Amino acid sequence: MKRPKLVELVLQNLLRKPATIQYPREKTPVEEDSRGIQYADLTKCTGCTLCALECPADAIKMTPIPQGYEIPAKNPKKIYPLIDYLKCVFCYRCVKICPVNAFIVTSKYDIAGPIQINSEEYSLSTVKKVSG
Ligand code: SF4
Ligand code: SF4
């Protein structure tokens, strides 16, 4: 009696789609509003440092906007929050405290591997490059 049931089970499982996801070939589905990487839009950021002070993981370092990038007049100190994603715990306290809503939030979570592990490239891509 037991053997036919076992054969039936094996056949059923052979025809069934795998329960696991072939990550990273297949991406794990995430909710749109899941807390992925976040970075400051430098056209909005005033360099007030509030986000860095609020961060419980000490993951934000206020950093000078490098030469060659347009610096908005509203940012007299010419600094922006550089986020270290290896320290960040994605609590989004920085996002919530920002008085000018400068953070761009994403659902991007796969930050392991040979890509940016801080927000530099993302933030600098929000402002124009200038010559000289
Ligand atoms: S999400 Fe939280 S841990 Fe990450 S940088 Fe913002 S305040 Fe810090
Ligand atoms: S709190 Fe907002 S405006 Fe202030 S430094 Fe952070 S991102 Fe910029």
Image: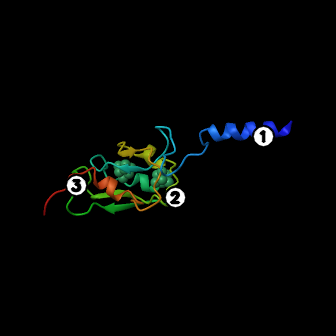
* Within-10-Å neighbours for mark 2: few <14, some 14–19, many 20+: few
Secondary element under disc 3, as helix, strand or loop, is loop
Name which residue lies at 27% across and 58% down.
78
Residue type, mark 2 in image: Ala
- Alpha-carbon span between mark 3 and mark 1: 69 Å
User: Badge 3 is on which residue?
Assistant: 71
Q: Position of residue 62 (x, y in %)?
A: 37, 60
Q: Indicate which label's residue lies in the foreground, 2 or 1.
A: 1
Q: Position of residue 36 (x, y in %)?
A: 46, 47
User: Badge 2 is on which residue?
Assistant: 57
- Alpha-carbon span between mark 3 and mark 2: 28 Å
Name which residue lies at 29% across and 50% down.
42
* Within-10-Å neighbours for mark 1: few <14, some 14–19, many 20+: few
Residue type, mark 3 in image: Ile
* First-in-chain label (3 vs 1): 1
Name which residue lies at 27% across and 60% down.
65
Name which residue lies at 46% across and 59% down.
59
User: Badge 1 is on which residue?
Assistant: 6
31 or 92: nearer the viewer: 31
13 or 91: nearer the viewer: 13
Q: Position of residue 92 (x, y in %)?
A: 48, 47
Above/below status of 113 relative to 15 = below
Q: Position of residue 131 (x, y in %)?
A: 13, 60
Q: Is the residue at mark 2 in contact range of ligand 1, meaning its CB lies under 8 Å from it?
A: yes
Q: Is residue 115 left or right of residue 73?
A: right
